[in-house]
Amino acid sequence: MEKTPENASQAAPLKLFGSWASSYTHRVQLALRLKGLEFEYAEEDLGSKSNELLRHNPVYKKVPVLVHGGRALPESVIILQYLDDAWPETRPLLPADAFDRALARFWCHFADDKLGPAVGAVFASMGEDQEAAVRQVHENLALIEAELRDGAFKGRRFFGGDEVGLLDVVLGCGSYWLAVFEEVTGVRLVDADAFPLFHAWLRDFEALDEVRETIPAVDRLLEYARGVRHMLLGLAGAGAAAASAAAAAPAEAPAAPAPAPAADIAVDI
């Protein structure tokens, strides 16, 4: 089979399916802008996803999805690494050293596996549950602060060095939500005194022109976040009421249907 020339593959059109409030979408948008790549953007209604999106991502049915020359690729971190593999000569996101690349991938996994869910739990809870989630966020931020102070990223302006890299994109395109969540919940998550290096990094990241072009206006994010939090807390209350009613009902009475899990609603954000 004849192989497609590399430059021909690079010239194929790029189309990104995403959602304006999705930090995962913002990751891909930012990476494309950092690399200077032109792309078509298709906004998805997450309440009524398009047939085209479902066809391109039948497994997870989520944004973002990048279509390059007719071939679709889902999952933001995988897309970022693909962009670096396909366009290695323009603004590399991953370092040249194999160990440093692996380290960046590890902390990207940490961001999605530990920090992100903890921040989401703060946003979707109240009372003791929220207090426990805040402690988890602070423990996770303390780990990142330690890496910036004494670990692999010591002395760097960005995690990628003098310029932003893969980890900066992954962490940064979620960290701006911290300030939004603080405003909506009234809970302080990032204290400049407790996490001075992380705080300084975030300010430098948010000051980049490409980041300013990518991240939506704060007032729009606040309005959206307030609506989502109201919905999530309402679902949590309905779930607790349904559980209490089921426990108090006679054994032969049918249990009340449980509301949809919050994760099913917020999973694309």
Image (cartoon, rainbow, N blue to C red):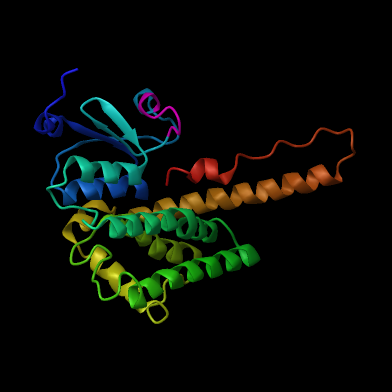
**Residue 207: percent from left, percent from top:** 21, 65
Q: Main secondary structure of the magenta part?
A: loop
Residue drawn at 16 percent across, 30 percent down: 13
Q: Is residue 259 left or right of residue 47?
A: right
Q: Is residue 217 left or right of residue 180?
A: left
Q: Which of the image's four quarters has the N terminus?
A: top left
Residue drawn at 18 percent across, 63 percent down: 163
Range covered by the magenta-colored residues: 54-61
**Residue 84: percent from left, percent from top:** 22, 46
Q: Is residue 38 left or right of residue 147?
A: left
Relative depth, front residue between 97 and 120: 97
The answer to whether any part of residue 21 appears in the image is: no
**Residue furthest bottom in the image:** 193
Q: Quadrant of residue 174?
A: bottom left
Residue drawn at 14 percent across, 39 percent down: 38
Vertical order, 200 against 79 (above or below)? below
Vertical order, 70 against 221 (above or below)? above
**Residue 41: percent from left, percent from top:** 24, 36
The answer to whether any part of residue 220 appears in the image is: yes
**Residue 121: percent from left, percent from top:** 54, 57
In the image, residue 57 lies in the stretch drawn in magenta: yes
Q: Quadrant of residue 96?
A: bottom left
